[in-house]
Image (tube, rainbow, N blue to C red):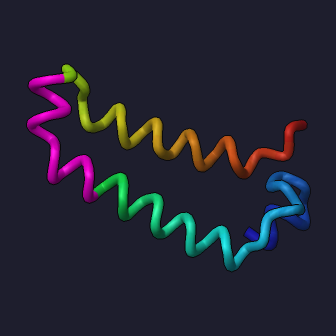
Amino acid sequence: MRQGIAEGTIRGSIDVNVFLVLLYAHVYGVMHTIYSKQDIYEDVFGLDPAIIERSALEVIESYLRTGN
């Protein structure tokens, strides 16, 4: 994180410690939800859990982008 901020590939306004706590919570929440409700997502909504995982990672990536 710090290296990416220093290189300008990650937004400089991010508080690294806060981000790491939120990252853990986000990943844990997504993974827990996917696996505890997998049958609902697949059977009711027709969603592949892998798509949900990939989308969750895209949200994180979007947050980190510098906008360049």
Figure label count: 0
Viewed as shown, does residue 59 lie left or right of 11?
left
Left or right of 63 in this view: 49: left
**Magenta-highlighted residues:** 32-44
**Residue 3 in the image, given as x and y percentages of width and height:** 81, 69
Q: Is residue 41 left or right of residue 12?
A: left
Return the x and y of residue 64 as percentages of the image width and height. Answer: 72, 51
- Residue depicted at x 46% and y 67%: 25
Q: Is residue 42 magenta?
A: yes
- The answer to whether residue 61 is above or below residue 4 is above
Picture coordinates of residue 27, whole percent (x, y)? 42, 59
Q: Residue at x 43, y 38 (%)?
A: 54
- Name the quadrant containing residue 44: top left
Quarter of the image containing the N terminus? Answer: bottom right
| Residue 23 coordinates in the image, percent (x, y) | 54, 64
| Residue found farthest to the top | 46
Q: In what quadrant of the picture does the C terminus appear?
A: top right
Q: Which residue is pictured at 47% across the width and 59% down the height? A: 26
- Residue nearest the viewer, comparing 34 with 5: 34
Q: Main secondary structure of the magenta part?
A: helix
Residue 58 vertical position relative to residue 8 in the rendered view, above or below: above
Q: Residue furthest bottom?
A: 17
The quadrant in which residue 41 appears is: top left
User: Is 45 included in the stretch rendered in magenta?
Assistant: no
